[in-house]
Image: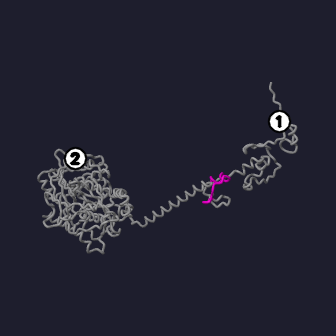
């Protein structure tokens, strides 16, 4: 049977542990004699268990706080004892704690200083390189914080200088909804996005008016070589609605079509999902025919500015940058631009019939009216009066042009300065305009497609000074093919005709009478109202074009009234012709 024999255990009357004299008498197997036992790592707390003869006020390690531990713990603490030899001392001397917290960035006289003269030293590489990397990281963080603070300061400074806008603009309806009007239906724009309809190529029934040739020298102007925008005071412009057009009346009597409209009205319907401001279109059902009209003084005669911007303009009547003032300004800029880029040498292209709205001896703006017919169904045709503004000979082929102008009123609103960006970043300027004026550009493109224009010219016109809304300069003129530009702005022709076809089918189901389509001023939807036959008969006195006097600069009163008078004269002439 195996036995366990306990060796001799010497007694130490003077303290704990074996007596010193016992080391010679004990025979410990495999233990060299006269060699003290030392631990090989700090975790091996081997040696005496406790020494009560040690001082109870052990100060502990250098750097430790007095009284951090209980005094009785010093009897068991041999970290400072010589029995741990040189290994613990070497580890203590080589140990260094790197503090990466924000509190460690106070001044430390023992920290090595790094400057452009610093060179790598193998002796201090172990202790200095990690600290230097930490300092570089912290330095980059501080620089990033400074840059962020600088951007925030500039942002708030620019916001304080920018003209104040309404936080949430509440737009007004384009027409006052009367209590006796009966709302028949409301159509959300979300239903328009799924519509699609293909129409065959249209045919020209008649072309009236005359055109002047385009001056190609305007294609070479730049912001550094700009031209002042001239004012054409003697030429009259006509904005005649559908039922007041004598040619459309004649075509309706000849049963050439079932539905009649103008390119302005059709483009408004086609691009309705992109619209933000309120608009209205009058629908008249007469027999089996349908007429789409606009009211006298309608918003369709003006051009919207910053309609689709994220921060709409304030509707303050007395401000030159209000919604109405900018619309009037854009309309005059567009008219003057369309005349200035023409070669006014008397060489004109005359069509089958003269301008149907001009009287003999009257100077009118050269416009070509193309009365075109589209087939919507087996027994349904649509006739529209479409406008082209100029003509040019390219490779011995005559091409029609449409002329329109974008206007810059204050770079602070758009964030892009045309004078600096047009030459080097023209795409960025166009992208900004597509964001802020998506509806206007889409309508111009739709009108060019309806008119069968081969090219659409876009002019970039800016104010001479942001606070001078009467004097302008032409900075650039760029040409686009309508179909390519429609693809660029994501304008689908099948969807455009699908919207028109759906509205025509809806209106053809109505009984004979007068109706009005109204774009809701605050929601993306259109409403259909049944209105009395005498509605809008006396609306000419409320024409918004008569309000332009309030936005003219006082210093140019003598010149300021004449272009406005030119438009009013043309419309007065229009009214006389209608009365006749």
Q: Answer whether residue 188 is visible to the viewer in this image.
A: no
Dot 1 or dot 2, earlier in sequence: 1
Q: At which x and y percent is residue 366?
A: 19, 62
Q: Is residue 347 visible?
A: yes
Q: Quadrant of residue 476?
A: bottom left
Residue located farthest toward the top when viewing the structure as drawn: 1
Judging by the rendered image, the residue that carries numbered circle 1 is: 28
- Predominant SS along the magenta part: loop
**Side of 428 relative to 177 (left or right):** right
Q: Is residue 292 magenta?
A: no
In this figure, which residue is indicated by the disc labeled 2? 199
* Picture quarter with the C terminus: bottom left
Decide: is 331 above or below 37: below
Q: Is residue 119 on the magenta stretch? A: yes
* Residue 397: image tag: none
Please, what secondary structure does the residue beneath circle 2 have? loop
- Residue lying at 26% horizontally and 73% vertically, measured from the top left: 559
**Label 1, label 2: how many angstroms apart (C-alpha)?**
111 Å
Which residues, given as a range, are shown in magenta?
A: 114-130
């Amino acid at each position: 049977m195996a036995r366990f024999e306990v060796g001799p255990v010497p007694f130490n009357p003077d303290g704990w542990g074996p007596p010193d004299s016992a080391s010679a008498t004990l025979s410990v197997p495999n233990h060299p004699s006269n060699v003290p036992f030392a631990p090989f790592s700090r975790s091996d707390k081997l040696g005496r268990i406790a020494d009560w003869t040690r001082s109870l006020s052990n100060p502990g390690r250098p750097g430790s706080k007095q009284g951090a531990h209980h005094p009785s713990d010093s009897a068991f603490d041999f970290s400072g004892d010589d029995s741990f030899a040189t290994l613990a001392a070497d580890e203590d001397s080589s140990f260094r704690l790197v503090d990466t917290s924000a509190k460690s960035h106070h001044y430390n006289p023992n920290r090595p200083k790094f400057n452009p003269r610093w060179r790598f030293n193998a002796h201090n590489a172990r202790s200095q390189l990690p600290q230097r990397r930490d300092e570089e990281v912290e330095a980059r963080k501080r620089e990033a914080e400074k840059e962020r603070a600088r951007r925030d300061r500039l942002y708030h400074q620019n916001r304080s200088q920018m003209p104040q806008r309404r936080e949430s603009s509440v737009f007004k309806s384009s027409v006052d909804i009367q209590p006796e009007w009966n709302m028949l239906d409301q159509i959300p724009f979300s239903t328009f996005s799924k519509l699609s309809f293909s129409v065959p190529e249209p045919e020209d029934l008649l072309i009236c008016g005359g055109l002047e040739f385009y001056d190609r020298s305007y294609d070479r102007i730049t912001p550094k070589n700009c031209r002042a925008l001239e004012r054409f005071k003697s030429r009259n412009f006509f904005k005649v609605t559908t039922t007041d057009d004598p040619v459309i009346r004649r075509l309706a009597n000849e049963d050439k079509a079932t539905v009649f409209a103008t390119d302005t009205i059709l483009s408004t319907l086609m691009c309705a999902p992109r619209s933000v401001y309120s608009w209205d279109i009058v629908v008249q059902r007469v027999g089996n025919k349908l007429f789409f009209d606009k009211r006298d003084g309608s918003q369709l005669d003006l051009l919207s500015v910053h309609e689709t911007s994220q921060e709409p303009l304030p509707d303050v009547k007395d401000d030159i940058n209000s919604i109405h003032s900018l619309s009037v300004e854009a309309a005059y800029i567009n008219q003057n631009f369309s005349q200035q880029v023409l070669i006014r040498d008397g060489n004109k292209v005359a069509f089958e019939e003269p301008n149907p709205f001009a009287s003999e001896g009257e100077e009118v703006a050269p416009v070509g009216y193309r009365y075109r017919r589209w087939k919507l169904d087996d027994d349904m045709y649509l006739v529209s009066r479409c406008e082209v503004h100029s003509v040019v000979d390219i490779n011995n082929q005559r091409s029609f042009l449409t002329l329109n102008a974008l206007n810059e009123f204050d770079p602070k609103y758009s964030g892009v300065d045309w004078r600096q960006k047009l030459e080097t970043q023209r795409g960025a300027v166009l992208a900004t305009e597509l964001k802020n004026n998506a509806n206007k550009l889409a309508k111009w493109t739709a009108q060019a497609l309806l008119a069968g224009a081969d090219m659409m010219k876009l002019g970039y016109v800016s104010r001479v000074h942001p606070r001078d809304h009467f004097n302008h300069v032409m900075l650039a003129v760029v040409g686009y093919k309508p179909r390519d530009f429609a693809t660029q702005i994501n304008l689908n022709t099948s969807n455009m005709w699908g919207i028109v076809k759906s509205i025509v089918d809806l209106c053809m189901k109505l009984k004979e009478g007068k109706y009005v389509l109204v774009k809701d001023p605050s929601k993306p939807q259109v409403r259909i109202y049944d209105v009395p036959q005498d509605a809008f008969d006396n609306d000419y006195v409320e024409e918004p074009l008569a309000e332009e006097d309030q936005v003219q600069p006082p210093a140019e009163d003598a010149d300021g009234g004449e272009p406005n008078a030119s438009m009013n004269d043309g419309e007065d002439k229009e009214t006389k012709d209608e009365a006749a």
